[in-house]
Structures are given as structure tokens and as C-alpha cells.
């Protein structure tokens, strides 16, 4: 048996270390990410029924909607995060490490100023917001929801700046280390919620504080560790802040900013639409189905995440054959993802039963719609990561803006016609269109036939 394990280890080690240096680094990160994110997925699945049992289906739906609304404020980075990711990857590829440190320091400074102003503004208007009306729930919960919103938003603002460490790690093609933060945050959240179930009655304020504080704690400790160890070269410094570099970061970041707003509408408005159309209790089955099929999305994301900065590096060095070869391999993985999605679909009634029991009823037709959405979504994702990595995002800018405009009215219309399935159908149609367009653009760029907007 030991000889078999040794042979398997040698086979895996040989497969990982075979090929271009960039590919080897990517494969090591993909393998590590699968292990780490596998743990995160498992914890996330355990956390759902635990949280529902701690509060109830309606309160859990309120929490999901509120947290997604707070997450909307993530677009206040005005694209600086994505701008830093590309500029830092370029600087590292060229060996310009002093410039890299300046990019990091400047981004931290700018985002701290922006989110600080946003937090002060929110603290001023929060007492006047009717959260019970916004979340379509009982007026008796108004005061409690106001407190929850303030807690969640305050911790979100801290996380807003602290999460830049994940951008720095990913830009250096080490997303596995960034994934570790999510794993630790999920693990600590699970422990805290478990303790709450044993020591307190269901309480949204405790729930919001627990799930908001743990990521901040993990990111704070991780930032201190990495910036005093392996990433000391890029550690932010007041002396290295250079606001003149904001233009460089924003030249690409401004486009990413608009795309982020569009993505915000496409990804984060479903909970609010469902709450307003059907009530917060219906957010729960929708998200249960989403989380189950999101296992495939997360698995595929593990593969493509290291590719963004790897594509940047290869494009700067004009190594187009490597890009073509890598995309071919990723498309083969997409076919495996399709099989995985279909397998989950047929097993979904059993999986829901052992996961959440009888506490939540998820219609099979919703699972079918979610399966189709995942297949279409990851097809466009692989091409988007390539286009983002090389900075050819003008067409994406226009298309995301257009689809964001039609998303909400179309989701409301289809939602009224087909219920939760209609909400999912909207996302499937939109991502299907984008996937076709972006795959055509990718083909044109790699074959050097892209002109005008296809090459911008």
C-alpha cells in the first residue's frame, strides 16, 4: 500500500512540475486551491442549516438580502482593485519592484480615503432608513435591522481595505494563499455560530456581528503576516504613496469600475427582487439551490483564477502559444463542469434532504434552471478572465452596461411569469449572450483578426 501511495505521489508531482514555469505555478495554486476551497465549500454547506436553525427561514432570508445589499458598496473602489491587479502583475513581470510597492501603497491610501467618507455618510443616514420597508418585513424589526445594518456595514468597510492583500497575492499568481483567508473566515464563522446556538436564542444582531467580524480578523492577521514576511517588498508604506499613479490605476480601473457596477446589478439584485416580489422567506430556497450548484462554479473558479494574472504575464511577454494552449485545456475542463452540474441536478432532491432536511422546500424546476445558469455562466467566465487579464475590456464595458439596464425589468417580468425559475432564467439568458460575444472576441484576438472595439 505504501508503494502505491509513493507511486501516486511521484505521478502527481511529475504532472504538476511538467511544462512552462508559469503553468507549473498555476497548477500548484490550482491543486492547493482545490484543497482549501474544498474545505470552504464543506464549511459553507454546514453553516447554512446551522444558521437557519439558529434563526429561521425568514430571518435567514433577511440576512442574505441585507448582506448582499451592503456588498453593493464594494463598487466604491472605483475599479482600483482590478487596476492594481493588472498593474502589479505587469510591474512584477518587468522586475519593477519599487513601482509595484508604490502601486500597492497608493491603492491602500486611496481606498481608505474613499471608504472612510462612505462610512461617515452611512452613519449619518442610517437612522433615517426604514429597513423594515426596504426588506419587506415586519415594522417591529425596524430598530433591530438598523443596528444589524450598522454593524455589518462598519465591518464591511474594514474588509473593503484589508482585502487588498488578496489582490496582491493573486496578482503574483498565488491565489491559493488568498483562498486560505476565506477558508479561515468560514471556519471561525462556523465555530462562532455553533457557540451562539448553544448559548443564545436566535438573534440577527449576534448573527450579523459574528459573520461580519471573522473575515476582518482573518484579513488583519494575514496582512500583518504576509507584509512582514514574503511580501515585505510590496508592503504598503506612507512614504511610497504617490497619488500621481492614480491615473495609471484608473486608466484601466475606470472601465473595470463601470463593469463592476454592471456586475453588481447582474449578480447582487436577485435577492432584493425576490424579497419584493415574493417576500424574504423565498430568498432562502433560491439561495439554497444557488449554493448547491455554486459548488461547480467555485470549482471552475479555482482553475481560472490563477489564469488572470498568468494571462497578463504571458501577454506582456508575447507568449501567445501558451495562451492558446491554456485556453484549450480550460475549455476541456468546462465540459467536465457540465457533467458535474448534470450529476448534481439528478442528485439534488437527495442532497437537499440530507443537507437542510424538511426545513426548506426547493422545487426541482428551480434546480434545473440553476443548473443551466451555472453551465452558461462559467463559459463566459473563462473568456472574461482572459480579456480582463490582457485589458481588452471595452466591448465588455458596453455589453455589461446594456445587460445591467435590462436585467432588473426582465427579472421582474420573468419572475412574475415563472416565479423563482424566471429570476434564474434572466441570468441565464444574459450570461449566454455575453458568453457567445466574449468567445468570439477571444478567438479574434488570438488569431490577430480583432479590429476596432474587438481589440480595445
Image (tube, rainbow, N blue to C red):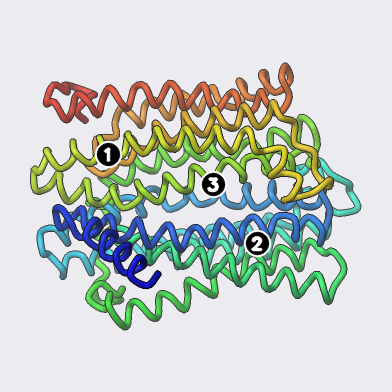
Give the mark nearer the N terminus: 3 vs 2. 2
Other-residue count near label 1 (Cα within 10 Å), few / some / many at <14 / 14–19 / ≥20: few
Q: Is residue 438 left or right of residue 371?
A: left
Look at the picture and state if 444 lies above or below 231: above
Residue hosting label 2: 152
Residue on which disc 1 sits: 329
Q: CA distance from mark 2 to mark 1?
A: 41 Å
Regarding mark 2 in the picture, which secondary structure is present there? helix
In the image, what residue occupies the spot 17% across and 51% down? 313
Q: What residue did someone put label 3 on?
A: 295
Q: Nearer the viewer, mark 2 or mark 1?
A: 1
| Residue 162 as seen in the image, left or right of residue 347 | left
Element under disc 1: helix
Quadrant housing residue 7? bottom left
Between disc 3 and disc 1, whose residue precedes?
3
Q: Position of residue 154 (x, y in %)?
A: 61, 65
Cβ–Cβ under 8 Å for marks 3 and 1: no
Single out the mark in the foreground, 3 or 2: 3
Q: Which mark is residue 187?
A: none
Q: Are marks 2 and 1 in contact (CB under 8 Å)?
A: no
Q: Residue at x 67, y 59 (%)?
A: 46
Residue extending farthest right: 140
**Which residue is at the front of the view, 244 or 1?**
1
Q: Position of residue 170 (x, y in %)?
A: 32, 59
**Label 3 packing within 10 angstroms: few (<14), some (14-19), many (20+):** many
Amino acid at each position: 500500500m505504501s508503494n502505491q501511495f509513493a507511486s501516486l505521489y511521484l505521478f502527481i508531482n511529475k504532472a504538476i512540475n511538467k511544462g512552462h514555469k508559469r503553468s507549473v505555478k498555476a497548477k500548484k495554486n490550482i491543486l492547493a486551491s482545490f484543497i482549501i476551497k474544498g474545505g470552504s465549500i464543506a464549511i459553507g454547506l454546514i453553516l447554512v442549516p446551522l444558521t437557519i436553525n439558529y434563526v429561521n427561514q425568514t430571518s435567514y432570508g433577511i440576512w442574505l438580502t441585507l448582506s448582499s445589499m451592503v456588498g453593493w458598496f464594494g463598487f466604491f473602489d472605483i475599479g482600483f482593485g482590478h487596476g492594481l491587479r493588472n498593474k502589479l502583475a505587469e510591474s512584477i513581470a518587468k522586475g519593477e519592484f519599487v513601482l509595484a510597492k508604490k502601486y500597492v501603497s497608493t491603492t491602500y491610501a486611496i481606498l481608505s480615503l474613499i471608504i472612510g467618507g462612505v462610512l461617515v455618510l452611512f452613519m449619518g443616514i442610517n437612522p433615517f432608513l426604514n429597513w423594515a420597508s426596504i426588506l419587506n418585513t415586519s415594522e417591529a424589526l425596524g430598530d433591530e435591522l438598523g443596528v444589524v445594518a450598522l454593524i455589518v456595514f462598519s465591518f464591511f468597510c474594514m474588509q473593503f481595505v484589508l482585502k487588498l492583500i488578496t489582490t496582491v497575492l493573486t496578482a503574483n499568481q498565488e491565489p491559493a494563499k488568498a483562498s486560505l483567508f476565506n477558508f479561515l473566515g468560514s471556519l471561525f464563522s462556523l465555530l462562532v455560530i455553533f457557540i451562539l446556538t448553544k448559548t443564545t436564542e436566535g438573534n440577527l444582531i449576534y448573527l450579523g456581528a459574528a459573520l461580519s467580524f471573522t473575515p476582518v480578523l482573518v484579513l488583519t492577521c494575514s496582512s500583518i503576516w504576509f507584509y512582514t514576511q514574503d511580501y515585505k517588498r510590496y508592503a504598503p508604506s506612507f512614504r511610497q504613496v504617490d497619488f500621481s499613479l492614480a491615473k495609471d490605476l484608473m486608466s484601466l480601473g475606470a472601465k473595470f469600475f463601470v463593469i463592476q457596477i454592471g456586475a453588481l446589478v447582474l449578480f447582487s439584485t436577485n435577492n432584493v427582487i425576490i424579497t419584493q416580489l415574493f417576500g424574504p422567506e423565498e430568498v432562502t430556497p433560491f439561495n439554497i439551490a444557488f449554493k448547491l450548484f455554486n459548488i461547480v462554479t467555485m470549482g471552475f473558479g479555482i482553475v481560472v483564477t490563477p489564469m488572470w494574472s498568468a494571462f497578463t504575464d504571458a501577454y506582456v511577454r508575447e507568449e501567445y502559444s501558451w495562451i492558446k494552449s491554456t485556453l484549450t485545456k480550460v475549455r476541456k475542463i468546462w465540459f467536465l463542469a457540465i457533467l458535474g452540474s448534470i450529476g448534481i441536478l439528478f442528485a439534488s432532491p437527495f442532497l437537499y434532504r440530507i443537507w437542510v432536511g424538511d426545513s426548506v422546500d426547493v422545487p426541482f424546476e428551480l434546480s434545473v434552471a440553476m443548473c443551466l445558469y451555472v453551465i452558461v455562466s462559467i463559459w463566459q467566465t473563462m473568456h472574461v478572465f482572459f480579456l480582463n487579464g490582457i485589458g481588452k475590456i471595452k466591448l465588455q464595458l458596453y455589453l455589461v452596461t446594456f445587460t445591467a439596464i435590462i436585467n432588473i425589468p426582465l427579472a421582474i417580468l420573468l419572475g412574475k411569469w415563472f416565479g423563482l425559475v424566471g429570476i434564474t432564467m434572466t441570468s441565464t439568458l444574459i450570461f449566454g449572450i455575453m458568453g457567445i460575444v466574449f468567445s468570439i472576441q477571444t478567438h479574434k484576438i488570438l488569431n490577430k483578426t480583432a479590429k476596432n472595439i474587438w481589440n480595445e
